[in-house]
Image (cartoon, grey):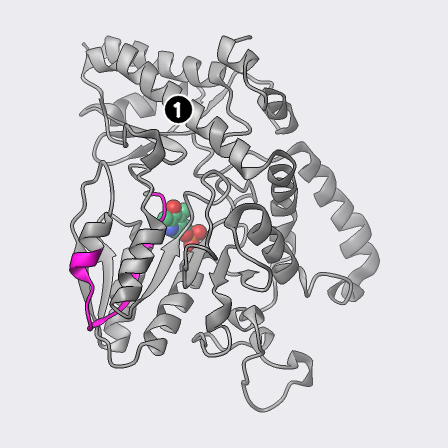
Amino acid sequence: MTHALDDADPLAALRDRFVGTDSDLVYLDGNSLGRPLKVTADRLCRFVEDEWGGRLIRGWDEGWFDLPLSLGDELGRVVLGAASGQVAIGDSTTVLLYKLMRTAIAARPGRTEIVIDRDNFPTDRYLAAGVAAECGLTIRWLDVDTSAGATVEQVAAAVGEETALVALSHVSYRSAWIADVAAITAAAHDAGALVLWDLCHSVGSVPTELDSWGVDLAAGCTYKYLNGGPGSPAFCYVAERHLDTFVQPIQGWIGNTDPFVMGPDYVPVPGIRRFLSGTPAVVGMLAIQDMVALVDEVGIDAVRTKSERLTAHTVDLADDRLAPYGVTLASPRDPERRGGHVTLQHPRMKEVVRALWERDVLPDYRDPGGLRIGLSPLSTSFDELERGIEQVRMLLSDLR
Ligand SMILES: *Cc1c(COP(=O)(O)O)cnc(C)c1O
């Protein structure tokens, strides 16, 4: 099937590199779980036979032990805008966010508040509440527009001498709103607070410049736009200026100095390795390597350009074909403020999404009434998108 926008897309041919893209299934949830790359199947197979099966325990000295940091450096260079030595891979995003929240609070003794928005991803909010209870802090909740997200003005008005940490998402999981990381970080710093950015919905689709934006701490997952596979380990970023003094609470042996000495005390190893706790999830890091290599080949800016075209086309199609049925846009209209997905609102969207899944059209649903169209820039085609939107239109017209 051909579509004029696919014909004009310089990255269109890359879709063939992903497993399953030759079927008629419409996949609009790559921001929840990215499709696997075909080369990943070979890599996994080779790993079992040659590396794991052949090298056995020797593998730890032959790259596995350093993989959390070597792949972290690659991720930093290719998509995060982070110089080497500041990114590590391990744990889940939830666990890393916990570690980084505790790190920040320990680094700002005497300060009593965490600033976070009420529409942040659930795990972030639950963690902040738990950490606040554990450490005797209170939360200053930001009320944000759920079709947008936290603004610089809101953060500037909320921070002060009592703020230890500001914890926000770069791209809102609900609306796709892109927060102004540089300006919000600067506002928090003016108040003497630290900032922790959740990059789950931006990493691999919206570029970041963590170093030049002055970010302190960040974390994100690798199974969304980085196609690492279900449950692949997360990553954390800690700015170099903090690495000598910041410590994290899960004092495991892998973050210790000389882990194989098995000594009596925990003395955090210099550098980003101190943010690791236990044995690296080597198998979980295999697929990420292939996707990072592909993004490197294409360039993150070209990925972002394709992503912007996909979301713009989604908005156009929604205006044209779905607005007549009462569907409204719950994402920013301004492409500069919009990340890689688009949320469309309708009171009966839950039923629509249930019927879509039965027809092999797989978007996401977020209460209340939000159809979340996730556009994985390198594996989603315009034709696939248009077929999906057409199914939504047909289902809405049947509801009447
Ligand atoms: C997906 C997502 C998470 C997921 O965290 P896990 O520990 O991997 O379950 C966290 N935060 C945001 C913003 C997300 O989008």
Question: Is residue 385 shown to the viewer in this render?
Answer: yes
Instruction: State which quadrant residue 94 falls in.
Output: bottom left
Which residue is painted at 62% across and 62% down in the image?
A: 69
Q: Is residue 242 above or below residue 323?
A: below
Q: Is residue 189 above or below residue 259?
A: above
- Residue 398: x and y in percent read 25, 9
Decide if residue 349 is on the left or right side of residue 202.
Answer: left
- Residue 196: x and y in percent read 36, 60
Judged from the image, the secondary structure of the residue bearing numbered disc 1 is helix
Disc 1 marks a residue whose amino acid type is Trp
Instruction: State which quadrant residue 32 falls in.
Output: top left
Segment tinted magenta in the rendering: 156-171
Indicate whether residue 168 is drawn in magenta: yes
Q: Label 1: which residue?
A: 357
Q: Nearer the viewer, residue 59 or 187?
A: 187
Instruction: State which quadrant residue 397 falls in.
Output: top left
Which residue is painted at 70% across and 44% down in the image?
A: 44
Q: Nearer the viewer, residue 248 or 179?
A: 179
Which residue is painted at 37% across and 22% down in the image?
A: 312
- Residue 296: x and y in percent read 63, 40
Indicate whether residue 393 is drawn in magenta: no
